[in-house]
Amino acid sequence: MTLDQPPGTFQKRADLVIALWPLILLTPLIRFPAPSVLVGHPWKPELFLSLFLIAVIAVLFFRKRRVYSFDPIGPVTIAMAAFVVWSGVSFLWAGSANSVVHHTLLWAEYLILFVILSSNFVDRRTFTYSIYVLGAVAVIISANCIIEYLLRESIDSEFGFRYGRFAEVWAALIPLFTAIAMRSRGYRMALSLLVTSMMWLTVLFSTSRTSLAAATLGLAIFFVTFLLTKKGRTQFKKLALIAGLLVILATLTQLTIFTSQSEEKPTVFGRIAISTEVDASNSLSRNIRFLFTAVSVEMLRQYPLHGIGADNYGVEFNKYRAAISANPANAELVTGNENAIPERAHNEYLQIAAELGIVGAIIFAAFLIALFRLGVRVLRESANIYKLAAVAGMIAFLCSSVFSSFSFRLAQNGVVFFFLAALLIGRRQTVKPQKNNAFLLIALIVCVAMVAFSSLKAASQYLTYRGEAGSNRATSLDDLSTAEKLDRANAAANYIAASKLLSSSEYGAAAVHFQAAIDKGVGTTATYSYLISAHSLSDNERAALDVAADGVRVFPYSPFLLTRYSVLLDQAGMTQEAQVNFARAKKIDARQSETWKILITDGSRKAAEAGRNGIGIRMLANLYPQDGLYAMLTERHILFPEERYTFPAP
């Protein structure tokens, strides 16, 4: 397998559609109408992956020449199939069946893609054109990241999320394009170095510490293993040239060019060196991953054998956060992060164990062991430079998975790993190749199911967007109701419907939808506050107290919720209990608690005036969480419309 020879004139052979798989990576950049609150499973990469696989299956089914064999029976594919089956079986005990379906279908498609690619990468042209398409896609995405980083005055969290997920897969692919540069000459070498450099810059500009560490590790593994080969020792200078280029790029961009720019534009080296005194929320010592880890361990502790159900981590998070919050030793761990919506654990292995138990973790480990045992066997037969790069990239990806929230959870990231796995173990068969029509039929059924599943999610997202933007209340609520029916996991539809119902004085109905949003994963302190308001405004004092008590169990170190609860208790005549909870709030943060109490009982003007007089915090904008401020203002404006600020007429 080599790229040294030009591929020649492109013949319109249908089987080369396989080489278009990298286009899946572009799908997250496709604009699609989205509501202001967007939670739940992604669908765009899954939909394109399914359509792509259907096209490939059709091509392979109708192809007369049986050039490649499909042999889904083997230790790697058996382990993957077992993982898919166990994921599907968790439907029986999972809280969210929708999440189980998503996880199971996605891993089934990983298996299909892996079998097809590993069976077809023995063809030089298929692999070559796949690399060309992948390189073009990498340039497009990397150029977007580089231009946006250079031209934007400040970099926000949205930028980091958009390109951080690509940084993870670029970390896995950089060794491969480095290998291509090593094996190429002339303009092909120049193009390979261009792609490598742009991916490296994307890793740096994404400011992802995890991706930088993974990319550095992958490159180090590739350089060392290649130098141990006979060919590697003869190309030491070329390897040193590429390594030097990457070091120079890192040095120039991180330490020189941007030192004089705005402090709002971070660098990845700067984030590595950040301290608690500079930014407690972003420092390594206070990283939210510690909370996610503790919750994952608690899930596994309670259900060690089978877990809580595939992809149910985000839906069930608050239940287990409440469990660890009951232990005073975890006070520092669970304090803060009141407005986070944790959909993933930021550790693929812990999340698999938490969701699928010890059984699922063992099956996944068996898959990795089988994959690398087969890879070692292949490398012993031939230490091909591309296969060495594939190993380095896979290790980089798997190491990134220890800290990443993307990993196999995002389809466009997972397909890169299985591309590298297919590149590693793909080899010519020693038996007469035959098509496996049974495999193709099962694969077609899986892909059609994912198309239907993803299409429903797309329609639900659009209707949620339309329902939020619509000015006609009845039409908007109809759209949101339909969106919820199409996708039962769509918490945004419930949250937005609840907000509209609250503003139109339908408090009982609003409470139902706010509760549904919390149950589906939008369990922030602000959402609890909105639900409390809905019950209070509908004169359901008991329900309001129960929700506040539940919120305090989940967030026992929230001055906002503790103060909110204490005011409700005081209004219900439970003065002593109210004083206890307010004392707890003040012990955590006296100034915040004082301001929250004045705001909740007397309104924002009184709270702001008290702040100016030295009581509580000086500026309401500094209240935490800010979403809680909006939640309380909403309730106050309903109860006391005169408090609503109106701009004077010109």
Image (spheres, rainbow, N blue to C red):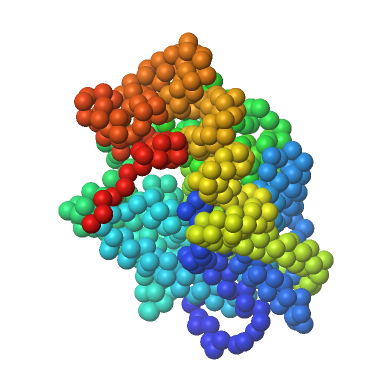
Q: Quadrant of residue 275?
A: top left
Point 38% across, 56% down: residue = 159
Q: Is residue 35 among the parts visible in the rendering?
A: yes
Q: Is residue 235 among the parts visible in the rendering?
A: no
Q: Quadrant of the N terminus?
A: bottom right
Nearest to the observer: residue 263 or residue 300:
263
Nearest to the observer: residue 499 or residue 311:
499
Point 37% across, 17% down: residue = 587
- Image: 119 above or below 99: below
Toward the right, the furthest residue is 438
Q: Quadrant of the C terminus?
A: bottom left
Residue 401 in the image: state x and y as whole percent. Answer: 52, 46
Residue 409 in the image: state x and y as whole percent. Answer: 57, 51
Count of numbered marks: 0
- Image: 517 above or below 448: above
Point 57% across, 34% down: residue = 538
Query: Is 68 left or right of 129, judged from the image as shown?
Result: right
Query: Is 454 left or right of 228, judged from the image as shown?
Result: right
- Image: 559 above or below 63: above
Residue 33 in the image: state x and y as whole percent. Answer: 51, 63
